[in-house]
Image (cartoon, rainbow, N blue to C red):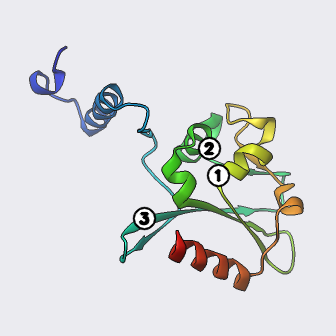
Amino acid sequence: MADEGRTMKFENEKELERRLRRWLEEKLDKRFVVLNGKKVTDIIVCREYYPRAFFLEVKLHKFKGDRIGIGVEKGKGVQPEIVKRTPKYFEKYLRWVLCDNRQNERKFVFVSTKTIKKKYLSGGEVGQKYNNIKREIFNKEPLLTKDKLIEKLLVWLKKT
């Protein structure tokens, strides 16, 4: 299987994608992280001057439970993968906007993946059982009004 891409036909696009990921992982050094997830994030903002892509993960805390779910069941999905593997690019260009929907007046938290990973993961890590952000994030991080959130977002988008 020296160059299976040249000699084999692919069953489907999913197989091509899986193999391309593997080839990249085999050839790239540790300065690169190839994610398995396809859906990158909830919102992508592209800056046209000094071009850059910014990513926002948006989470709404609902009335049930004491945690905010990330990804899909059993620790799968791109959100848990980003939290677990912490690619440096996403640490700089991805932020989480969490909204506490239990209050009459909406309040928001604006944090990095690093903050979530260090302080607020249920069980202290991403795994099959622990795929959540603790609700205590709303008690310990600054709560922002909509106007303050937008202000912080604009500063991050313009100065990063």
User: Does the rendering let one see residue 69?
Assistant: no
State the mark number for residue 83.
2
Q: Which tag, 1 or 3, sits closer to the chain's start?
A: 3
Inspect the image, locate mark 3, and give the three-letter code of the amino acid beneath it: Ala
Q: Do the residues labelled 2 and 1 touch (CB within 8 Å)?
A: yes
Q: Mark 3 points at which residue?
A: 53
User: Residue shown at 49%/51% (left/top)?
Assistant: 89
Which quarter shows the N terminus?
top left
Distance CA(mark 2)–CA(mark 1): 6 Å
Distance CA(mark 1)–CA(mark 3): 16 Å
Q: Which tag, 2 or 1, sits closer to the chain's start?
A: 2
Relative depth, front residue between 49 and 111: 49
Q: Which tag, 3 or 2, sits closer to the chain's start?
A: 3
- Give the secondary structure at mark 1: helix
- Give the secondary structure at mark 3: strand
Q: Quadrant of residue 104?
A: bottom right
> Residue 90: x percent and y percent?
52, 52
